[in-house]
Amino acid sequence: WKCSQCFLHSVDRIRLRAMAIFIHLVLSNFAIDFHTVAAGHRRFVQHPHSASRNRVALKVLPDGMQGQLVSSGMTTPFPSTDSLTLPAVLLITFAVLLVVSLRLQRTTAAATARNDFGPYSNVYDILGELYSLGAIRRTKLAGTQYFFRDSRVLFAGVGTGTDSVVAVAAGSMVTAIDISKDMLERCRTQVEAIQLASNRAPLRCICQDIMTHREEYDVVVANYFLNVFPQATSRAVLEHLCTLVRPGGVLLIGDFASSTDPILSPVQAIYGGIPALSFWFLAGNAVHTPYDYAAWLPSDMCLVSRLPEGPFHECLVVGKKS
């Protein structure tokens, strides 16, 4: 922690110095004659679409181009393209340092908010819908036939709760857990309309780490939740979720599909890697190929069925032995 903080402060100092050098070079290399600025870098040229050869219009010359201002016989040179090279390099360096420092600030100073998608709650569902062409939504709803009236259902990492709405509408007693208050608020807003219209049981929202939860449920749902963790953590979370399923209950896992096919597997890795890289930068998610959750199941759990949604998504139905 101390080493990362020291490195972060060093990056900030380098970033500020690069900014100062860049501003100085911009001011010195782009000093243009006052008359050029006043004239707006314009010159008179013949209008290409005019029927009359005598009609003229103003045309803006690009910055950095060698030329002359021709308006009243006055000539003023423009800065050469070579003068842009060093400032451009410094600008790129400054941008890289800015991204690195912001990434380190998110990773170190806000380490406790890791995997928190709250800042993106307004666009999370939209991005998933566009990227997967609706496959993520359909995968989340693939196991809704296991939601029964008065059954106790837990949504781990509920997010915006599009799937929890179906459970509430079916009459289930739903508990939603997420570390993001923003996500839970959006989930509660979506469910409230169903509750008011059909007089269903109220949604129970808990803002906490799923690893600290100890109750048992008829159905435990983990849709696109286990993939945010590194492999060891994801496996530990899966084992904990299995302990929350009562004997005879069901665990539903909707996620990116994994395959051992030599042709399909690399394609699945690329398809799942794009959002993984995006959310690694935004929220500190782990970057990995799709996990094979069926291979991690403890001895008291068994895979009942796979519900595929195209080649890239699937819902695993896992039962707990009585």
Image (cartoon, helix red, strand yellow):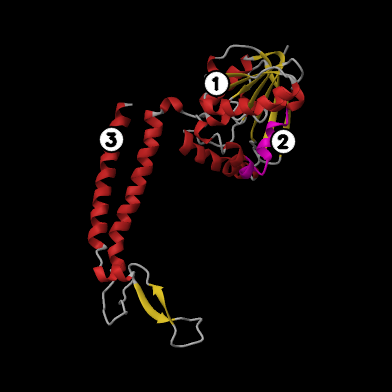
| Label 3 CA crowd tier, 10 Å (few <14, some 14–19, many 20+) | few
Question: Magenta segment: does it hold 67?
Answer: no
Span colored in magenta: 129-143
Question: Is any atom of residue 80 visible in this view?
Answer: no
* Cα–Cα gap, marks 1 and 3: 35 Å
Residue 82 pos. (x, y %): 29, 66
Residue 119 pos. (x, y %): 50, 34
Q: What element carries label 3?
A: helix
Of the numbered discs 2 and 1, the one sitting upstream in the chain is 1
Q: Is the magenta stretch mostly helix, strand or loop?
A: helix
Amino acid under label 2? Pro
According to the picture, the residue beneath numbered tag 1 turns out to be 236
Q: Is mark 1 on a helix, strand or loop?
A: helix
Q: State whether residue 269 is above or below residue 199.
A: below
Residue closer to the observer: 243 or 152: 152
Which quadrant holds residue 36?
A: bottom left
Which residue lies at the image location 28% right of the left edge and 48% below the top edge? 19
Residue closer to the observer: 58 or 231: 58
Q: State whether residue 92 is above or below residue 112.
A: below
